[in-house]
């Protein structure tokens, strides 16, 4: 479904990714792990069109993504969350999710300005759907709260709801368990599994929490200094000396 | 309760010319005109975070288009004149907005500031059409057989158009377009990741903002009856920015309140000729220090506490 081929990108003199290739299959839960600075978030930025690679190809369901603007990529069915959260801080949680639904709605400037019945029907339906999503991530009580004033864990979950509002086929989660306590992490794991099992979503997750990674992933790819050092099932990864080496060699893990 | 208050307010506005002297009718018309500009500017600066110090330029374009149309095509109904003034200004807004896509913050402020100067220069240079520094006397607006010559008639024209434009802005703000603009202000990358076409919406904000300001400029031409380039200097642009800062960035009701406060303040300060800029500046600084979110957010807090 998502194919990354020989991807390289550097910032200034720093090589963030070099010759990275991987393939994510439909309905797979795929984990990208590795020490901080390994290039995991950069992979997401390239896939969503925010960063342009110096070499390589990215295909999504057969289509070349590198020629598309970020909003077009989003409309192809790729939604994401951000490591350092990018909620719309001064807007309510509900409005955050409604913006996630942007591409699904039809009411434009003129029809909106005229307040046509069609627009209000669409808005009412969108609000109901947004509330249902907030409920799903355990935030329905915070619908009217300014997103910036929510605790970090809640902002992370809000971003998931916003991403889901776009009705994506591929969901990219950047450290979704950051700031979550163990119970919340458990709930998150069930949510991610449910998205795949019940809705057929494909999920790529970047995460440091090994319990989550080992618990939900079908396959794991380990990055270090922008290169793949290992990939396989969670069990294979855990036993790979190269992975143990990389993790013991870094302060983070 | 809310509807009763709104209804009572509506009745007062409709009877206003019967209740107060003509000068206050004129002043109220000016407030509504400025409120339309403030809403337009807020959609660009408060909603989309694109600062403009050139809105006097858009205002001038609208005023001159309306004035010239009324002089050259007297049979045109005023509604068409105003619509054309708005559309022409929206085109100018597009022409400015597209190159400005690359600019942010201070650079955008500078570019729009320069735009304001360019418009005044253009008016001076097109003197065969605009009569340059001499200015243009604007005939009364016509609506079929009616000539809207009195302060009261002008007031009703302004009030009617203003009500439509406020309603449209409220609807825009509450639906998909308004949310997309706010999303851009809050986080451009998250907006894009949500499928919002940045360039399209930033340009749209310019066009809509210019449309509002152009229509208001047309109304202004009819309300004051005479326009000349010196009425559209950079200080007017600053006043428009002051309206949305005092009223509240990103708020339609705030835009209206801000326009009323600044317009009345100006009128009141007319008694203190020499101290006017000083007092105006002090009041502005006070507002920014003590009401950083503008009057709108202060009112929101009060109503929140009252509940
Ligand atoms: N936009 C950017 N500009 C400059 N350097 C960047 C940028 N994005 C990422 N980097 C650098 O690329 C490397 C990989 O970053 P990142 O992908 O965020 O790592 P990870 O998510 O694995 O922690 C880091 O050294 C980071 O500083
Ligand atoms: Mg990262």
Image (cartoon, rainbow, N blue to C red):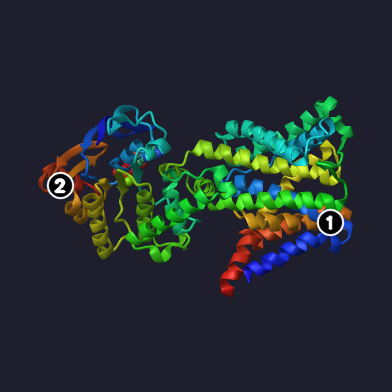
Query: Is residue B139 visible to us here?
Result: yes
Pointer 2 chain: A
Q: Report whether B301 appears left or right of B190.
A: right
Q: Quadrant of residue A230?
A: top left
Q: Quadrant of residue B70?
A: top right
Asked whether mark 2 lies closer than 8 Å to ligand 1, one says no
Residue B231 screen position, x and y as percent: 82, 41
Query: Is residue A253 visible to us here?
Result: no
Q: Which residue is mark 1?
A: B25
Asked if the residue under mark 2 is in contact with the one under mark 1, i.e. CB atoms within 8 Å, the reply is no
Residue furthest to the front: B145
State the residue at coordinates (66%, 37%): B112
Q: Report whether B21 appears left or right of A15.
A: right
State the residue at coordinates (87%, 46%): B149
Image disc number at residue A198: none
Q: Quadrant of the C terminus of chain B?
A: bottom right
**Labels 1, 2: front one:** 1
State the residue at coordinates (46%, 63%): A145
Disc 1 from disc 2: Cα separation: 80 Å
Rate crowding at label 2 as few (under 14), some (14 to 19) or many (20 or more) other CA atoms within 10 Å.
Answer: few
Q: Which residue is mark 2?
A: A244
């Amino acid at each position: 479904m998502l194919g990354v081929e020989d991807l390289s990108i550097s910032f200034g003199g720093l090589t963030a990714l070099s010759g990275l290739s991987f393939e994510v299959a439909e309905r797979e839960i795929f984990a990208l792990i590795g020490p901080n600075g390994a290039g995991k978030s950069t992979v997401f930025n390239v896939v969503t069109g925010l960063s342009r690679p110096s070499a390589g190809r990215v295909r999504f369901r057969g289509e070349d993504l590198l020629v598309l603007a970020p909003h077009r990529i989003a409309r192809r069915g790729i939604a994401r969350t951000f490591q350092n959260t990018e909620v719309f801080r001064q807007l309510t949680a509900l409005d955050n999710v409604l913006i996630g639904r942007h591409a699904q709605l039809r009411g434009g400037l003129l029809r909106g300005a005229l307040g046509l019945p069609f627009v209000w029907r669409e808005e009412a339906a969108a609000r109901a759907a947004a509330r249902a999503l907030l409920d799903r991530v355990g935030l329905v009580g915070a619908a009217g709260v300014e997103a910036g004033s929510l605790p970090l864990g809640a902002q992370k979950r809000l971003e998931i709801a916003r991403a889901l509002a776009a009705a994506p086929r591929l969901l990219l989660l950047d450290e979704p368990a950051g700031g979550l306590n163990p119970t919340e992490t458990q709930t998150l794991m069930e949510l991610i599994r449910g998205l795949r099992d019940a809705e057929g979503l494909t999920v790529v997750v970047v995460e440091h929490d090994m319990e989550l990674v080992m618990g939900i992933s079908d396959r794991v790819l380990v990055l270090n200094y922008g290169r793949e050092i290992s990939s396989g099932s969670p069990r294979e990864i855990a036993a790979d000396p190269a992975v143990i080496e990389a993790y013991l060699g870094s302060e983070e893990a | 309760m809310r509807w009763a208050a709104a209804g009572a307010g509506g009745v007062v506005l409709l009877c206003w010319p019967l209740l107060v002297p003509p000068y206050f009718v004129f002043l109220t018309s000016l407030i509504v005109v400025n409120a339309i500009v403030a809403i337009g500017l807020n959609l660009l600066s408060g909603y989309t975070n694109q600062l403009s110090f050139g809105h006097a330029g858009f205002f001038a374009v609208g005023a001159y288009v309306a004035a010239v149309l009324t002089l050259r095509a007297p049979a045109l109904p005023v509604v068409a004149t105003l619509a054309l003034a708005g559309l022409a200004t929206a085109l100018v807004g597009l022409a400015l907005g597209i190159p400005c896509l690359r600019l942010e913050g201070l650079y955008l402020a500078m570019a729009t500031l320069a735009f304001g100067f360019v418009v005044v220069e253009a008016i001076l240079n097109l003197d065969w059409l605009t009569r340059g520094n001499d200015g243009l006397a604007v005939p009364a607006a016509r609506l079929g057989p009616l000539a809207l010559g009195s302060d009261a008639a002008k007031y009703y024209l302004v009030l009617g158009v203003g009500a439509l434009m406020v309603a449209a802005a409220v609807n825009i703000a509450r639906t998909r377009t308004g949310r997309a603009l706010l999303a851009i202000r809050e986080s451009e990358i998250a907006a894009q990741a949500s499928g919002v076409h940045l360039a399209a919406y930033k340009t749209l904000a310019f066009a809509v903002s210019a449309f509002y300001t152009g229509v208001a400029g047309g109304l202004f031409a009819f309300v004051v009856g005479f326009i000349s380039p010196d009425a559209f200097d950079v200080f007017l642009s600053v006043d428009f920015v002051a309206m949305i800062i005092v009223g509240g960035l990103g708020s339609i009701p705030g835009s209206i309140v801000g326009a009323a406060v600044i317009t009345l303040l100006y009128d009141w300060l007319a008694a203190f000729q020499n101290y006017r800029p000083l007092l105006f500046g002090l009041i502005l600084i006070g507002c920014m220090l003590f009401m950083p979110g503008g009057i709108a957010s202060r009112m929101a807090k009060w109503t929140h506490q009252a509940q």
